[in-house]
Image (spheres, rainbow, N blue to C red):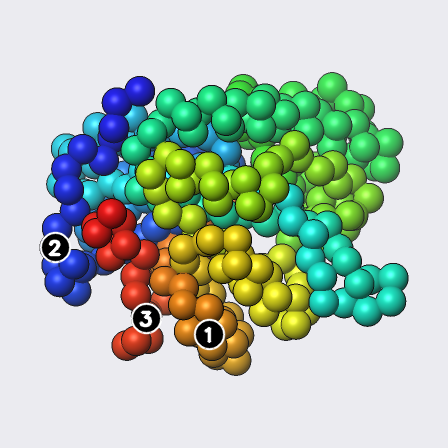
Amino acid sequence: MALIMDKPLAPITAFTGKKIDLHSHSTCSDGSHTPSELLQKAFAAHIDIFALTDHDTLAGLIDAKQQADTLGITLINGVEISCEHTLTGGYGKNKAKDKIIHVLGLGFDDLDQMNATLGPIQDSRGKRGRLIVEKLATLTGFEVEALWEAVLLQANGNAVAVGRAHIAQVLLQQKIVPTMQKAFDKYLADNKSAYVPIESLSMQATIALIHNCGGKAVLAHPTRYHLSATRVRKLIAEFAEFGGDACELPSRDEPISTRRMVDRQVAEHGLAVSIGSDFHGSSMPWRKLGDVPVLAPEQVLVLEQICRA
């Protein structure tokens, strides 16, 4: 597959004053807008540099690139990869905890190798979605096929694109839960009653894959895994030890104390930073395209590393 980011980025100084969003999702995973629609919304939001980072798939990048070129937006090749990691730092029986952590790959150019490696993970998403629905049918008394058809409708008929956000939307529509968040809190979050783990790479293998494909590895939303502050710090430290390049900064609606904690870890471990809205569209309307945190003066944006590579 040909390189999509086929023009070099502008000099580093040109990032000053640019509107940047390096984390978003389309209908190729669990977003509500097609890649083309997403780029149109990015244009309307006056975004200059943008990354489509669908879960475990590059399926939307070609359409996104075509629309980006038309609109004059610089598109960065992106993907959000689900990976396994055992977190330490707890006590007693909770001394170790297995979690699915998300790592963004940005600026890679070997799409063939990335696609070949992510293929089995993509295939597992449809199987996982079906297994979650089967668990939910048992828990709620709803009929399996009816629930599954409703989930597929949310995912535009694409089983491998099914994510937990699609399933949460159906639970909300069927009045099984009062809010999307409640769907996760009661059924879908890690280790809840309907949770099914996804097939995934280790964090170390994920970082190596991104590097082998010519990209930079970014720890996505480190404060959104329902971890203690101790474990968040440990996660960032281990990500850096494994060769990760950057850490995504907390969203602007998170407490300032959370941001300061992440800033300290970024500085301590010599990481660059990334900024993104994690925009999904109607399934998560509180996340606004282009609504990203501001870098501290001493922080280095991961785009600068991509530009120098």
The answer to whether residue 284 is seen in the rendering is: no
Count of number-bearing discs: 3
Given residues 104 and 89, the one toward you in this image is 89
What residue did someone put label 3 on?
Answer: 299
Disc number placed over residue 268 in the picture, else none: 1
Residue 279: horizontal and vertical position, in percent?
42, 48
Taking the spot 33% from the left edge, 29% from the top edge, the residue there is 110
> What is the CA distance from the residue labelled 3 to the residue labelled 1?
12 Å
In the figure, 27 relative to 24: above or below?
Answer: above
Dot 2 amino acid type: Pro
What residue did someone put label 2 on?
Answer: 11
Q: Nearer the viewer, mark 3 or mark 1?
A: 1
The answer to whether residue 256 is seen in the rendering is: yes
Given residues 227 and 44, the one toward you in this image is 227
Disc number placed over residue 235 in the picture, else none: none
> What is the CA distance from the residue labelled 2 to the residue labelled 1?
27 Å
**Residue 222 left/right relative to 199:** left
Taking the spot 62% from the left edge, 35% from the top edge, the residue there is 200
- Indicate the secondary structure of the residue bearing disc 1: helix
Sequence-earlier tag: 3 or 1:
1
Given residues 192 and 6, the one toward you in this image is 6
> What is the CA distance from the residue labelled 2 to the residue labelled 3?
17 Å
Callout 2–callout 1 Cβ contact below 8 Å: no
Q: Nearer the viewer, mark 2 or mark 1?
A: 1
Residue 242: horizontal and vertical position, in percent?
52, 53
Dot 3 amino acid type: Gln
Residue 9: horizontal and vertical position, in percent?
16, 47
Sequence-earlier tag: 2 or 3:
2
- Indicate the secondary structure of the residue bearing disc 3: loop
Q: Using the rendered view, name the quadrant where residue 60 is placed.
A: top left
